Amino acid sequence: MNGLISFSLYGDDPRYTENCIKNKPLADRYYPDWTLRFYHDNTVPAHTLSILEDQGCELIDMTENDIHGVVWRCLAVDDENYDAVIIRDADSRVNYREAQAVKEWLNNEETLHSMRDAKEHNMLFQTGMWGCKPKQKKFSMTEWLNISEPLKKKNYQHISGYTWDDQLFLGMLLGNKETHINDVLAHDDWLRHTDKQRTLPFPTNPRPRQHVGYAFLDPTEESERDSSE
């Protein structure tokens, strides 16, 4: 199974530049043999990119692209060289709980995977917590992003709370009858959105505090280990 983990990275905030480099060692544990790819621009410190390159991560320079950086990582789902692509946040870290959910998704037929591991995760798709089997999908992410004006750098905006234009876009693109409605396996202990997704509880116990998608605001914070790990 050929897998890819895709991230966006821009700016010099340590929340992102110091956390992102911690994902490769964790991925080696939880996603052995998967490739890590970072879509970045020229605002990222050179030493961060050098570390990622030394770790063996793929780097794709998006400096000249007019799409907002938050969704660069989503372009990876068009890469049919991979059997599975998962999209993650650069200020978060992969963990055992999510890897077990991904494993369950890969063992099922659904094209798309969604995870919601906090009460605030109320969207059909959280931008850093979903996945796709590229060879089964019915859309071109590249084409959709190129025509989506709200997701261009000049237009992108935060709406409120946990609601962002990128999450609304993903829900619209992936959750309609023309694409993959009823072709989504979701992991959500609250069992939400069952009208559009086959929703299951996570196959492992909840983590003490660092839920799937947890943002490490302090990059020196240690990663928790799962009780069932």
Image (cartoon, helix red, strand yellow):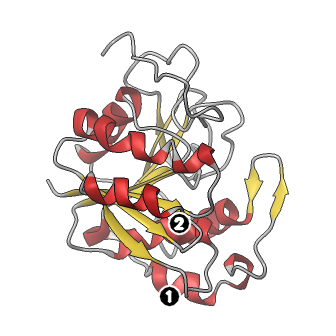
Q: Quadrant of residue 147?
A: bottom right
Give the farthest residue toward the right: 160
**Element at badge 2?**
helix
Front residue (pair 102, 198): 102
Q: What separation in Å lies between label 2 and label 1 (alpha carbons)?
A: 14 Å
Asked if residue 43 lies left or right of residue 223, the reply is right
Observer able to see residue 104: no
Residue located beneath label 1 in the image:
143
- Kindly identify the residue that appears in the image at 20 percent across and 72 percent down: 81
| Category of crowding for the residue at label 1, using alpha-carbon neighbours closer than 10 angstroms: few (below 14), some (14–19), many (at least 20) | few
Q: Position of residue 170 (x, y in %)?
A: 59, 65
Give the farthest residue toward the top: 227
**Element at badge 1?**
helix
| Residue 157 higher or lower than 48, as above or below | below
| Category of crowding for the residue at label 2, using alpha-carbon neighbours closer than 10 angstroms: few (below 14), some (14–19), many (at least 20) | many
Asked if residue 200 lies left or right of residue 15, the reply is left
Looking at the picture, which amino acid does disc 1 mark? Glu
Labels 2 and 1: the sequence-earlier one: 1
Residue located beneath label 2 in the image:
174
- Residue 89, numbered label: none
Q: Position of residue 61 (x, y in %)?
A: 44, 77
Observer able to see residue 82: yes
Looking at the picture, which amino acid does disc 2 mark? Leu
Q: Which of the image's four quarters has the C terminus? A: top left
